[in-house]
Structure formats: C-alpha cells, structure tokens
Image: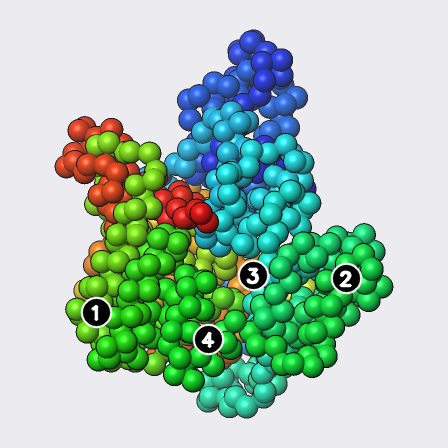
Amino acid sequence: MTLNQNLNIVAFTRGLLVEKDQEQIHTDRLRNELETTTLQAELMRLGFVLDQPAFTHLTKWKGEDTARYFNDILPVAKELVGAKRSYRPIYVNFPREVMDTPTFQLMMNALMLYWSNGQWEPPQQLAERGIQFEKTEFRPIKLVSEAEFKQIFTKLVGLNVALAPGDRDLVEWFVKWYGHNLPMPKRVPFKETLCLLASFGLDVPVETTTDVLRIARFISGGDISLPSVPKLPKQTESKSALASIRDAFGKGFSRQFQNRRESLIQERERFKFAHVRRSSRRYLLGLLEKTDLDTSEMQQRLEQWLRLGEILHPGEYRRQFPRTFAAFQALRNQPTRIRSYFAQIDLAFAAGDLELALDLLARRPGEFARRMDWFLRTYEDSEDLERVLERFAGVASRISSKVLLELYGHLYGRLRSKRRSVALKRGSKMKTLEVLAPLKEENVVRVQEIILKALSDLFCTLPPLGKVWIDEQLKSVVLPSSMRNMNQGLLTFTRGTRVPFRADAGTVRAFVHWYDKNGNEDIDLSAGFIDEGFVQIGHVSYTQLKDPNLGSCHSGDIRHRRGSCAEYIDIDIETARARTARYVTLHVYNFNGRSLESMPECKFGLMERKHPDSNEIFEPRTVSNAVSLTNQSSSVLLCAIDLVDKSYLWLDIEMDRSMPFIENTFGQTSEILSAVLDSNRLSVYDLLKLHVNARGTQVETPEEADVRFTWEDFVANYASVAEFMTVTPSKD
C-alpha cells in the first residue's frame, strides 16, 4: 500500500466500499446499472464480488464517480491476485509440455538457457488448452459507513501486538488522510504503535526514553521496533558441486556473495539517524525532558543514544532542556558506571541476593513473567521457589493478558524435552535454541494456575458475553506472533495457521510472478516433498523440472529475462500422497543473493485447480492467496501443503543459508516444519474459551448462542484475535 492512495483504493484492499453521503449520490439507478454491472463482471473474473448492498449503493453514484472508482480499483484488484501484468513462463504449454518432454531434452534446453545467460528460450507454439469449469469462492466487497471505516484505525492502534507492515502503513495513511479527526481508543497499549502515532504529531503520552528513541528512529526512516544492526558476513562459504556447475553459466559465486553483502550494507544505512531540522531536534529534546530520563534504561542501547546525541546537539539547548543535557553528559562520560536495569538484576543474582532481584523484577511484572522458565529450572528443587511463586502471584494481576497467554502456552511445551525455536525480531527467521530438560509438572501446574486466575480476573472486567458458540475449526488458528515481519497480500495468516483448500481441487499450482526491468534478476520457485518422518523424498525445482512419480512439474527456470516473468509448480495431490509424501514445502529463492525486498515487484501465490491442463495457466479467480515478497533474506519458506489433511500450513519463514537451491536447505526445512507442527502456542479456540469461562456460557450449537465465533471471522484477521488478547491491567 502506498500512502498516496485514495479512500476507494484503501477500502477495497480491506474488502470494503465506503458509502457516500446522500448529497453525493443520485437516485436514477438505471443510468448507472450498466457501468456497475460491467465492474462486477471484471471483479468476478479476478475472484472478487460486490455484495448486494455494495452493488445497489454503487448504482446510485454519479457517473463520473463510478468511472473513477472503476479506474481506481481494477488495477489494485489485479495486483492483489498477481495479475498486474501478463506474466509468461518458459514453457508456455505448462504443465503438459513439461511432462511430455523427455528429461534429456529438458536438460539440453536448460544448458542453452544458462549458456546464453537467459537470452535463449525454446521455440514453442501456444497450444489450444480448452475450457473447463473451475469453482470459484469469491471474496466479497461489503458496504460500510465512513464512521465504520474509521473504526479500523481505532481497532489497530488499540491492539497490544506488533502491527503487520501493511497495517502500520494503513495507520499512517489514516493520519495523513483524516488528520487528527480520528476516533482514538481509550489506551494505546503497544509501545511501537504509540510511538508511531507520536511521530505523526498526535497527542499521545510519551513516557519513557525508549519511546523517544523509537520516535527518532521513525523520523530517520528506520524501524520503530529497534532491531539490532545487521552484521556483514564473511566470505567463508564453500561452493557445492551443483552450485559450481550453475555458477559457470552465470555470474559466479563471488558475485552472488557480493550482491548479498551490498544488500546488507544498504540495509545498515537504515540504522543511521538522519540529520533533522532544528524544530525536530527541539521536539525530540522536549519529549526527553518530560520523561524520567532513566539513564539505566538508556544504557541498554548506549551506542544508539550516543549516535542520536550527535544529531540532536543537546549542548546547544542546555538551558532549555537541562535534564536532557545532563543525561547525555552522564552517558557520554560515565564518571560512575551506569548499570542498565537488566545488569542490576544480573548483579543481584550473581551476589546471591534473590530478594533484591525479585524486588527489581516486581517493578516490571512482564519481565518477571518472561524469566519464569529460568526460575523453574534454576530453583526447581530449592525452597526459594516458594518465594519466587509467591512474589509472582502478587504481581500477576499487573501483567498484560498477552504476556500471560504467551507464558501459559510456553509452559505446555516444557513438560517434555524437544527442540525449541523462536522468531527473531529482525526479519522473519527462526532461531533454534538448545534442548532443555523437562520441567516438573507440579511446578508448571502451579504457575499455570496463577496465570489462569490472573486472566480470569482480567477478562471478568469486560462486558458479559452470554451464551457463546465457538467454531471447532478455530483450533487450527494460532494466536498471532511476530506479525511485524509478515508478507502482506490478499490474506494475512498467522504463522502456523492451517487453512483448508477447496475439497474438489485436485492440483495446487504455486506461482511466483516478478517484473525484471533490467534483466539482471533470477528468482526461483521450488517444492520439496517430505514424508511422515520429516525426511525429504523428492523435489521439483530448476535443477529437476519434473518428478512424474510424485505428480509434480515446474514451468522452467527464468534467468535474466527483461520484462514480466513467471514460474509455476503443479502438485497433484493424490499422486504425491500415494507415493508416501505427507507435506510439500514451497520456497522462493533469489539466486543472485540479494534480498527479496530488493525486488520492487515480486508476488507468490497459490491456485486451486480441478483441470490443470485446461483454461489459462494463470486463472486469477482460482487464486486462494497471493502475497508480495518483502523478505530481508534471499530465500523464504512460504508454506507447506498437508496432503493428508488437505490444508496449507502457513509459514512465511526466512531461511538462514545463502545457497539458493532446495537441495541445500533440506535439513533446515525439516527442522522448521517439525518445530511449527510441534508448537505449543495456544489457538484462537483456547483464547475464546478462556473468555467464555470468565464471562459467559458455552453452548453446543450456533442456534442456541447469543454470540457466535466463527472460523471466517478470525482466520485471516489477526486484529480481531488480538482484540481478545488485548486486556491490559490498569496502573492503579
């Protein structure tokens, strides 16, 4: 989403049409029905449909307004499903042409392609594909009032979770479109969102020095979540035989490494503070002057504060902001070493002063909760555990429900030994942690009982729900986590969520579309086939265009072609399943080593087809999801197809190896997949049941219920889920 988009476009990307005031419409419906029907037909070809109220309202618009709406949203609808251009694969009669061509000929064609650096392509003639009916599940466009539309802003800034990138942009768009005439929630509980609003000049409470640092980062065009500065890699990787062969026909391994290094250098530039005008310097210094100027908190990010001080020149404003000037002097000179909050805790533990450490943690109950696993490990057989649990019970009521829910789910997974993985703040990579011995069940149960009581007390402060029905399918939707790095598109799923595909779909067709202006890009789509034991039993990629035994084929490797490019992979569900495959993982690699976000136009998506040999290769209305790839890595594992459950397991996880082919990532892929499937994260069903236990009664059928929580309401709407997670205790 770009910030210069108008209201029609932004509303459409949310599946909405904002109604006009009465003075902006006419009542001669017949005059406008033809244009509206034409628009409806175009939208349906792309998989969208105006619902009846939206269609009827649009027929009342003035003719020029309808035409403007048509011109606004059609390009956006095409871009959302990956149909912005006419994208062309190597083999234009895919999939039949690939399956019928001998493997030897496919190899010779690939060699000709690489020898010519992507300029040669096999001579072909487009064959007649025929027409077959494909079922379409249309995405509705619903009518809302402008007041209801503004509530999107209110909901987003009232969440206590990190916003997805598109939603951060949407918040900024609302501020720039409506100014300060926006309905604000009672509280903005999430610090990153609060600082985002403050950087736009909205009157929100900026309370800590870290808040000001976030604002300064945003003003400089940096990341408000304050990630660590990325480190430059050393050229220590060695080439495999397969990489060496392909590099001989391309730019070589050293060039690939250099591209990756240059991409990281550009990324590091974002961490520099920009030189700002005097008015902005006074604004930031004034915000600092109003905080408690806790130098122990500033010490945690000392280098960033010293760099910011060089930009703000606090010495020039020492009379206007004396406390701020003194704080920077203390940080710079440190006549007495300043200890950060976390250093003070570590020193207390090192000195054996548990009481002091607990006093410090009680000042930040959320940090207390995050250290609970360590407490249970360290004091498992000690009498001191009683003191720890007693103090934790005393502060649990001051911990946000989000942190309590995360801890509750985490403890479920600590009753047995297993490989642990966590999502990194920067990028969307997973980090594998050491395997720990299981915790004692009785200790885990005691902590969970404290958590459940605190959650119940929090949820009881909300309005009663009455009789509630919860869709069982919500057990497959996990609570949102690390949304700040999700790729955005038609639908945004939480990592680890299962999404069923259409029952009559016999083939899943994955695609990657990109536009290469200069002819120097090489994007690769790959699929790996994994059995029940998480062993890779086959693959389809540019190194192997087909595997008839697994019922899968690739449309051909495009390398350095100018213009519109496409790669497709077909997976025949029943054939692959019959060959003991359980999962099919789908990957996208940038062979040149640059980050995927360096591509201005690159889209991954999935089609569900019953007749893969008929109709066009790319049918927009059969697209079940499509996302723009903006990953900081050069490779990403997008999703896994569960061939038995007939569902997608959405992953969107960056790979941490630079070698751009699927054979090099077999082990890492299996580790990620098994870790996600063995996750102990709570589901949306679990969350809603906790609410019902605290303030309602659960019923068996939807007909009995006053409130119905359906799968459709939550599966692609993490904001609605987060609303039920966002219950923050008062500071009283």
Badge 1 crowding class, 10 Å Cα cut-off, few under 14, some 14 to 19, many 20 or more, is some
Q: Nearer the viewer, residue 90 or 252?
A: 252
Query: Residue 640 sits in which quadrant?
Result: bottom left
What label does residue 322 carry, if any? 2
Could you tell which of marks 1 and 3 lies nearer the N-terminus? 3
Residue 148 in view (yes/no) = yes
In the rendered structure, which amino acid carries the disc numbered 4? Ile
State the CA–CA distance, disc 2 to disc 1.
50 Å
Badge 4 crowding class, 10 Å Cα cut-off, few under 14, some 14 to 19, many 20 or more, is many
State the CA–CA distance, disc 2 to disc 4.
30 Å
Contact between labelled residues 4 and 1, with CB atoms less than 8 Å apart: no
Observer-side mark, 3 or 2, equals: 2
Residue at 60 percent of width and 23 percent of height = 66
What label does residue 514 carry, if any? none
Observer-side mark, 1 or 3, equals: 1
Badge 2 crowding class, 10 Å Cα cut-off, few under 14, some 14 to 19, many 20 or more, is some
Which residue has dot 4 on it? 345
State the CA–CA distance, disc 1 to disc 3.
34 Å
Q: Nearer the viewer, residue 418 or 25?
A: 418
In the rendered structure, which amino acid carries the disc numbered 1? Asn
Observer-side mark, 3 or 4, equals: 4
